[in-house]
Amino acid sequence: MADPATNGKFLRTIEWDMMDKRKFFPLSMLSSFSVRCALYPLTVIKTQLQVQFRNDIYKGMIDAGVKIYRAEGVPGLYRGFWISSVQIVSGVFYISTYEGVRHVLGQYGANQRVKSLAAGGCASLVGQTIIVPFDVISQHAMVLGMGAHGGKNGAVNPLGINFDKSSSRLRITHDIAREILRRDGVRGFYRGYTASLMAYVPNSAMWWAFYHLYQDELLKIVPPWVSHLFVQCVAGSFGGFTTTIITNPLDIVRARLQVQRLDSMSVAFRELWHEEHFHMFFKGLTARLVQSAAFSFSIILGYETIKRVSVNEQYRHMIKW
């Protein structure tokens, strides 16, 4: 009887026990860092669009990118990058949890979509628990001084830090962390944690489920000569689009909670509704869709390539690129 993962022809999904982990982990970290380096400016633009009051500072994604670049150059598009890059470490725990849960559920006979849905949610829970403190700091760094080059309400500086463009990134990060600790204690680094879980756990669960759904559906209609890796990348992008549209309001609430130091999700939601009404569902959506599609395509390209490189010798004849 053929292994379900091979579909009787080739490996649609390379499972956890089919790979050499000594190759997989270091290559995975390198891939994650490379993607983050290339696409981080989209994260900065998205965050600043979500935090601004209506269209006070930027009119859209391109306008935001141009204004940030003109005011601060390339460094402005990489605010908070180094502290955010700690996510590479959390990414190891994320993918280990994802693959581990898939492996366990597979032993109980769960199908691909159920395994992906459950494993994606568990992986995000672990990843967010590790990364939220660094996320809080990096988002403060992303928006610090925002609006000084055109906002009606002045520069954004919720922590009241003495901000100088000549200050080193390390100094700014240190000042942000120290001020959060002084004001809120350790709990301050987990501001917006519940909102992060509510935004990212279902996002991750749905993204992996949609990824496998779109992959299966695309494989039914594409010619046999089309690259399986390309199909997977397109499926990842489609999954990113779908989950981004569904979870966008929760991501905005999370960003507002972490940066504007609001008391609760309900307060953040009420303020957003008061400011934006139905527009809140689309605030920063274009930037987030572009970011999500680019990240999804790139992450799957790296992830599935590394799985192919790391696959054990006995499965290599089942691999289709």
Image (cartoon, grey):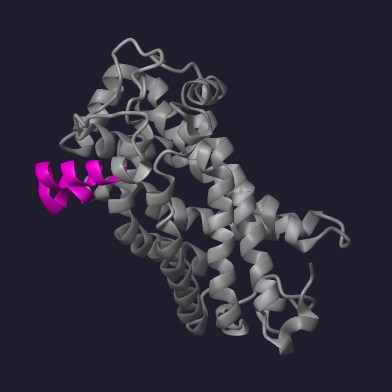
Q: Residue at x 48, y 25 (%)?
A: 68
Is 181 on the left-hand or right-hand side of 211? left
Q: Position of residue 255 (x, y in %)?
A: 33, 37
Is 297 on the left-hand or right-hand side of 180? right
Check the image and report above or below for 134 versus 172: below
Of residues 99 and 135, the one nearer the viewer is 135
Q: Residue at x 50, y 23 (%)?
A: 64
Q: Residue furthest top?
A: 152
Check the image and report above or below for 36 versus 265: below
Of residues 272 and 191, the one nearer the viewer is 191
Of residues 67 and 221, the one nearer the viewer is 67
Check the image and report above or below for 134 versus 289: below
| Magenta residues (range) | 173-189
Query: For residue 195: magenta?
Result: no
Is 1 on the left-hand or right-hand side of 260? right
Q: Quadrant for the N terminus, please.
A: bottom right
**Would residue 218 be seen by someone viewing this image from the given angle?**
yes
Q: Position of residue 198 (x, y in %)?
A: 32, 49
**Quarter-wise, where is residue 152 in the image?**
top left
The tally of labels here is 0
Of residues 293 and 120, the one nearer the viewer is 293
Q: Position of residue 47 (x, y in %)?
A: 41, 34
Magenta stretch: helix, strand or loop mostly: helix
Q: Quadrant for the C terminus, please.
A: bottom right
Q: Position of residue 308 (x, y in %)?
A: 70, 73
**Would residue 111 be seen by someone viewing this image from the given angle?**
no
Query: For residue 180: magenta?
Result: yes
Check the image and report above or below for 36 versus 129: above
Q: Residue at x 48, y 68 (%)?
A: 95
Q: Residue at x 23, y 46 (%)?
A: 177
